[in-house]
Image (tube, rainbow, N blue to C red):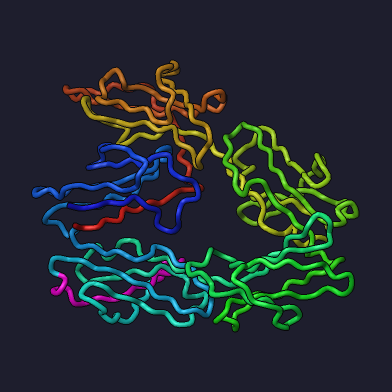
Amino acid sequence: MVTLMCSSTVCALSDKPAAYIWYKNQEVLYQDWSPWYQELVPSGQADRYSCAIKGLEDFPAPAVKVGAGDKSCLAINYNKSRICALEGSSVNISSEYSSPNYTELKSKYWSKITWNGERETLMKTEEEQKTIYTLTIESVKQNDSAEYRFRVQGDEKSQKPGVILIVTALQVRVFPTTDGQTVTLMCSSTACALSDKPAAYIWYKNQEVLYQDWSPWYQELVSSGEADRYSCAIKGLEDFPAPAAKVGAGDKSCLAINYNKSRICALEGSSVNISSEYSSPNYTELKSKYWSKITWNGERETLMKTEEEQKTIYTLTIESVKQNDSAEYRFRVQGDEKSQKPGVILIVTDVEVKFSPSAEVTEGQSVRLTCSTHCPLTHKNYTWYLNHRLLPEHQNKHLVLDPATSQHAGSYSCSVTDQEHTRSPEKTLKVQSSSSQWREAAAAAAGGAAALLFITLAVIWIVR
């Protein structure tokens, strides 16, 4: 018996998947809301299993091979897939290794893979039990951020994704109130949520200990005089405090900019609204407000001033977006350094037809057509065309032809329903008959586009 789990490789997904789809030897097996699947291990030839999230079938997990006599019965499992640790703390990364012949595989060690792909072999680990190994990193630093994999020489399964370690620092976040009399401070990490709950937070005011508490929040009356400097640290790691933040009645740290979304995926030709909420005790005195566009190569462009809907809400509207509108958009206020905080990422996508397993199939085979985009759209209905003719019975993102016949050969295109003006370029499906004669429509030229955003899934298996 083997249990499979469909999971992300780096972090827990923010949005709950609609459903998980399981594949066996490239054929759809079933779909369910649970990421778990259990199967009897066959005694014959090994099978290959994969999974995907419904609506994102173009980005399945790499297939894993499972069989009674296959080395997939060798399994490496980690107690965590991701660890967020504060700089200066100690980290334990554990791996459980199971194999029918684990005693025969003696060369066991940890490998460190950095973000630029460099690999480093670490020292062999101490064997706690027959199959449990732990790597301990004392006083972690920023350059310890990497992926760590437990490796066993001769076992290819030791190449499976390991544990992502992110080493982060502390920061003081400032949240002003609308009356301008009080300010709320939060002690938080800069890169990720800490895996281990802090014992306590220690607050400092002008380098003097203020108090300590289990909560990361602190509220203070804004001083009418000279600004004060606040910092924080975690108990036991006082040598690694957050950089001090200056707070005072006339200080600009009480200015805040927040966006209603951090990321927008928009179809080419549609209209996009990007909103920002700006709060400041003296917002009426800061009159120069505008949006800045930052492209992927770092170029900056100042856009026109926006219309003020309310006292503090500003919206940028982009009509009929194009591919070159893809960029980061930041709301800016002259003289307010907080307007430099990260803005809203806009990704503009078109649609294209993709074939799986191939655009050339034989009669009787199954072929799946996907109306693909470079980022997830919120639309659920799609329109399909064959040789310029509407296929009204098909309104899903995927068009499955099972079995494919010679009548299915031709030029296919698709669009998002109600936005047919953004129809994809035509792609040709060829269906080979039993007499090896090809029926095809006119070939369509369509350039491929690299995906800007993708979700990588992995399958974790547990042998029973």
User: Is 202 inside the magenta-drawn segment?
Assistant: no
Q: Residue at x 58, y 44 (%)?
A: 347
The location of residue 17, given as percent across then percent down, is 43, 43
Seen from the viewer's position, the closer of residues 421 and 290 is 290
Q: List the single residue furthest toward the left.
A: 44
Using the image, determine if residue 363 lies above or below residue 307: above
Q: Is residue 168 left or right of residue 103?
A: right
Seen from the viewer's position, the closer of residues 319 and 314 is 314
Q: Residue at x 44, y 26 (%)?
A: 413
Q: Is residue 1 left or right of residue 410?
A: left
Q: In the image, which residues are magenta? A: 102-118
The location of residue 324, given as percent across then percent down, is 62, 42
Seen from the viewer's position, the closer of residues 416 and 302 is 416
Q: Residue at x 28, y 82 (%)?
A: 126
Specify the quadrant of the image occupied by residue 208: bottom right
Using the image, determine if residue 193 lies above or below residue 285: below
User: Is 116 inside the magenta-drawn segment?
Assistant: yes
Location of the C terminus by quadrant is: bottom left
Q: Residue at x 63, y 46 (%)?
A: 261
Count how many numbered circles sit on residues in the image: 0
Q: Is residue 332 left or right of residue 65?
A: right
The location of residue 185, given as percent across then percent down, is 70, 66
Q: Is residue 349 left or right of residue 19?
A: right
Using the image, determine if residue 122 lies above or below residue 279: below
Seen from the viewer's position, the closer of residues 175 and 433 is 175
